[in-house]
Amino acid sequence: KAQDYYNSALVIEIGQDDLELQASTIRNIAEVAMLMGNYDKSLDYFTRAAEIAKNIGAKKLLMEIYAGLSNYWERKKDFQKSHQFLKLSGSIKDSIYNEESIKQIADFEVKYSLRNKDQQLQMITKESKVQDLQIKTQRYIVYIFASLSLLILALFFIFYTRSRINKKAKRILEAKNIHITEQKIVLEKAIAE
């Protein structure tokens, strides 16, 4: 009954052009045929599934097919071929593990690189904010210094102008005092005569 379900599934999968799914179903059919004792049919299906898996580069599926062929040859008491397929299966398993390890290492490197770049970006952002604050502080200092300079200059100008006005007023007063003193002397002379 399982054989019938797999055969029906295979017909549907052939219509969908999904080669990996077809190879997987063919492998399942081979396993069922082997369990039912139909070894010749099982070998044909395993061989067909292996061809498809090789052509599409489905390593994990090919590893499972080779493991199935190892079981097949073990049941047929050909332990040398069983061992060969077991080694092939193990070799593919190691290859898959190595590829996955390399991929994980690459993923970790990318994540580390991204995390490192993110930290660098945060540092640059912080440094930029600090520089912005320093620039703002320097501007405020310049504005305050300029304002104080203008205030001091204005006060100096006011004091200078006041001083000139006071000196001018003092000269005028001295001139008037001299004139008054002269008139007083002239008047005293006129009275004394």
Image (cartoon, grey):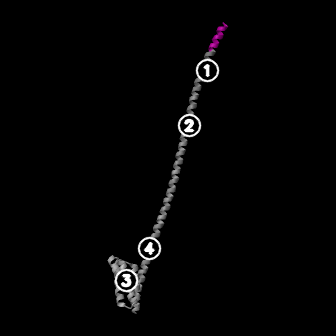
Circle on res. 174:
1
Of labels 2 and 4, earlier in sequence is 4
Q: Is residue 9 above or below residue 142?
A: below
Circle on res. 154:
none
Circle on res. 6:
3
Q: In the depicted view, which residue is nearer to us: 100 or 49?
A: 49
Q: Is residue 15 left or right of residue 63?
A: left
Q: CA distance from mark 2 to mark 3?
A: 98 Å
Q: Amino acid at mark 1?
A: Glu
Q: Is residue 153 above or below residue 189?
A: below
Mark 4, other Cα within 10 Å: few <14 / some 14–19 / many ≥20: few
Q: Are marks 2 and 3 in contact (CB under 8 Å)?
A: no
Q: Which residue is mark 2?
A: 151
Q: Is residue 77 above or below residue 95?
A: below
Of labels 1 and 2, earlier in sequence is 2
Q: What range of the chain is rendered magenta? A: 182-193
Q: Amino acid at mark 4?
A: Ile
Q: Amino acid at mark 2?
A: Leu
Q: Which residue is mark 4?
A: 102
Q: Is residue 156 left or right of residue 102?
A: right
Q: CA distance from mark 4 to mark 3?
A: 36 Å
**Residue positioned most to the bottom:** 77
Indicate the position of residue 79 as horizontal and vertical percent values: 41, 91
Q: Are marks 2 and 4 in contact (CB under 8 Å)?
A: no
Indicate the position of residue 53 as horizontal and vertical percent values: 36, 80
Of labels 1 and 3, earlier in sequence is 3
